[in-house]
Image (spheres, rainbow, N blue to C red):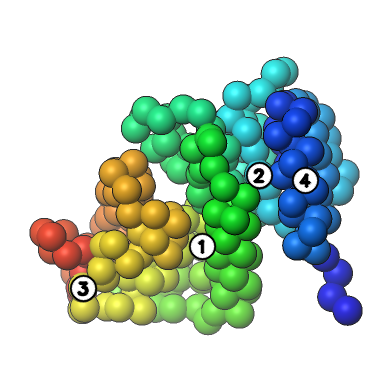
Amino acid sequence: MANPIKILLAEDEAALGQIIKESLETRDFEVLLCNDGEKALKAYQSEKPELLVLDVMMPKKDGFTLAKEIRNVDDTIPIIFLTAKSQTQDVVEGFTIGGNDYLKKPFSMEELIVRIHNLINRTQLQKTADVLNIGDYTFDFPKQKLNYKNEDATQLTHREAHLLFHLIKNQNSVLDRSLILNKLWGTDDFFSARSMDVFITKLRKKLNKDERIKILNVRGFGYKLTI
């Protein structure tokens, strides 16, 4: 029997944290529950979880700060933010610093579980995918690295890597905006759409050394990578 997937849950609301922990354990996850950011960082360092669920507003160290510190040493671990914040800039910040998904409180446990499974499936895909070529770039999807000719590799975030993977796989065809938002963000709402625009802009900059490569905005439909 396979070992259960280990999840680190950082949530300072005791009752909510316990509910989430027990719900995930009924689905055969192993859950490490911490009630502040400092304890969560220590648990991450000692227990090596496979996925993080981080509340944004926590004592001692908030979820965004915690995620930034973890991303400095780990570019691949999936991160889901739990947040009461609903401002666009807060959501975009969460994705920009390396979050893979977010849920606004209150949320249903079923939705959290679906999003966890989606991230796990994406991570498994990443581990088995091939190295891809696009123009003068080599894209190592499993390692989330983008190489231009003989220069040092550029490290991509988890979400940047998956977005680029789908753009390359659909090269010269329109990548449906709603479909990819639901696949990578879990929703196609306004906040996620704004976040996706930010990531597209970042990928354009990282691919701009080869002038043949374009990521086109097909208004009303999505994006198309051409070369």
Observer able to see residue 37:
no
**Is residue 15 found left or right of 146 in the rendered image?**
right
In the rendered image, the quadrant that contains the N terminus is bottom right
Give me the residue at 66% from left, 44% from top: 53
Residue 225 percent across, percent down from the top left: 24, 70
The amino acid at mark 4 is Lys
The amino acid at mark 3 is Val
- Secondary structure beneath label 3: strand
**Is residue 128 found left or right of 152 in the rendered image?**
right
Observer able to see residue 207:
yes
Comes first in the chain, label 1 or label 4: 4
Q: Residue furthest top?
A: 60
Nearer to us in this view, 206 or 108: 108
Quarter of the view holding residue 180: bottom left
Comes first in the chain, label 4 or label 2: 4
- The residue that label 4 is drawn on is 21
> Could you tell me how far apart the alpha carbons at marks 3 and 2 are, in whole angstroms?
32 Å
* Residues at marks 3 and 2 touching, judged by CB atoms closer than 8 Å: no
- Secondary structure beneath label 1: strand
- The residue that label 2 is drawn on is 53
> Could you tell me how far apart the alpha carbons at marks 3 and 4 are, in whole angstroms?
40 Å
Quarter of the view holding residue 147: bottom left
**Is residue 68 found left or right of 39 in the rendered image?**
left
Where residue 145 is drawn, which disc sits there? Answer: 1
- Secondary structure beneath label 2: strand
> Could you tell me how far apart the alpha carbons at marks 1 and 4 are, in whole angstroms?
34 Å
